[in-house]
Image (tube, rainbow, N blue to C red):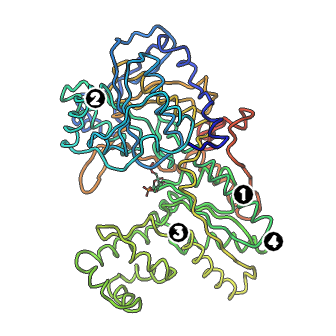
Amino acid sequence: MNLSPLQKARYEYTPKLPGMLRSGIAEICVAEGSETSSVADQEKIRELFPNTYGKKEITFKKGQNTSTPKKQVVGVILSGGQAPGGHNVVCGLYDALKATDKDNVLYGFKNGPSGLIDDDYLIFDDSYIDQYRNTGGFDIIGSGRTKLETQEQFAIAAEVCKKHGITAIVIIGGDDSNTNAAVLAEYFAAHNTGVQVIGCPKTIDGDLKNDDIECSFGFDTATKTYSELIGNIERDANSAKKYWHFVKVMGRSASHVALECALETQPNICLISEEVAAKKMSLSQIADQIADSVEKRAANGMNFGVAIIPEGVVEFVPEFSALIAEINELLAGSKADTFNALPNWKEKYAFIESGLSKESMAVFAILPETIQQQLFLERDPHGNVQVSLIESEKLFSALVKDNLAQRKAAGTYTGKFNPLHHFFGYEGRCAFPSNFDADYCYSLGYNAFMLIQYGYNGYLSKVSNLSKPADEWVAGGMPITKMMNIERRHGEDKPVIRKALVELDGKPFKFFEANRDTWAVETAYTYPGAIQYYGPAAVCDLTTRTLALEKGE
Ligand code: FBP
């Protein structure tokens, strides 16, 4: 394998464990806390999880290990989108498992949850695992988006575990994957399989967090990567003074990534989808808000700027969601064939005009033609509009351009507006994990093994106090059912882990809100620079502004 100098150096990096896990496996004991109940819908969740509901939260501490010795054969699965640090969860798990007993075995099920069902796996050894220490990506075993949710799948999973003598499964995933981990844990318990299930909180989107889980892994590195790029763009904008940059950043629906990048780089504009929804903002209102900044900056001779757009924002614009719903209806079933058979865009446009309500047509009409066509051409296998493919950075710059043309005609604006567009997503998902993510992930994996060793089932590996240095981190576990409530999904009531959106009364948003009017007009950019792996802890080990603000720091 060809190795870059950084890759070689990162192999040698020793991730930091929480202080309480540093004394060696024989010196880690458990302190059980109080029994838990779900965040809402307690009776329904208790009924659905009779074997795993209400268990105690636990914390590890230094002391005589009292677990019952037993050979452990563990299977690990990476689920969903890549997030920096996933390899280190596997490494931490492997190291704790082997440090306990060198005859313990770790299976890696390949390409996501489907690997368990297909019985497609590899068995880890030192030389294999050492190639992945402290590196980004999920290529150690691959990932996938198959969901483990049906009774048939669970029965096959139980068979596969039985065949290999597997004692526990660790699922590394986001809110959906960990919801499914809880259901699988309940199934295994109800069927007396003796197999435990432990989850680990992953996603760059940062939307798997709650009173217990301070952040999901990967968010730190991904936002640092995007913030470096945005900071570089800001400096370029401030040097050339001729472009407005519209930067879309990943984060399927929540705006945590956009907000963190804004806190790190202080751009002129950052949209927050949750605020757009709360204020029921229209596309024109959003464009007007951005155009205000462009106009005020132009009045001060600054015909440049940077705007951050969260990936999912258009779905939070009520009039746009209504338009999407109508388009899906307009093309349902065979109507799509009629539409597709029309020979040109002019005729297709007339078809659309006759099928949409007056309100939705008014929204459709203000969209740039490329976006209009995207809405009709790129649909998923069910015929629905693929909102995630909409180039919202181009949509908003086009709407701002139209708005500015009106201001020019009215004589209030005389500046120049040259927009450029960027989308940062995949650039950050497989970056070398920051020291924080390398340490956090290794700790999550190591801790997951401690939960297995102590016999816990249906727990999420929990490491907290994360804004402090690693030796002050607190390791333990939380029953996944504690994080669940009932939500309507695909027409059915389902027990799920609640997705965490940006809280508009939370400290990170409040800080942004208090400063954004200044940032909109002045050039207040901050330049975070590249992630640093070696150097002073104050530069290399700090985690996100979001977490620091949430912790009141
Ligand atoms: P997870 O929720 O699985 O962690 O994935 C997050 C994410 O990176 C989103 O930010 C993005 O919208 C999505 O995955 C893209 O996934 P894909 O590349 O599979 O389309």
Q: Give the spatial CA distance, label 4 vs label 2.
A: 62 Å
Q: Does the residue at mark 4 contact the one at mark 1 (Cβ under 8 Å)?
A: no
Q: Is residue 52 above or below residue 366?
A: above
The amino acid type of the residue labelled 1 equals Asn
Pick the residue in front: 253 or 67. 67
Q: Secondary structure at mark 4?
A: loop
Residue 323 figure quarter = bottom left
- Which badge, 4 or 2, is on the more N-terminal residue? 2
Q: Which residue is mark 1?
A: 232
1 or 2: tag closer to the N-terminus: 2
**Residue where numbered disc 3 is placed:** 392
| Residue ID for mark 4 | 300
Q: Which residue is mark 2?
A: 52
> Cβ(mark 1) to ligand 1 < 8 Å?
no
Tell me how far mark 2 sits from mark 3, CA to CA: 43 Å
Residue contact at pointers 3 and 4, CB within 8 angstroms: no
In the image, is residue 505 above or below residue 358?
Answer: above
Task: Give the residue at x 34% y 11%.
Answer: 68
Residue type highlighted by circle 4: Asn
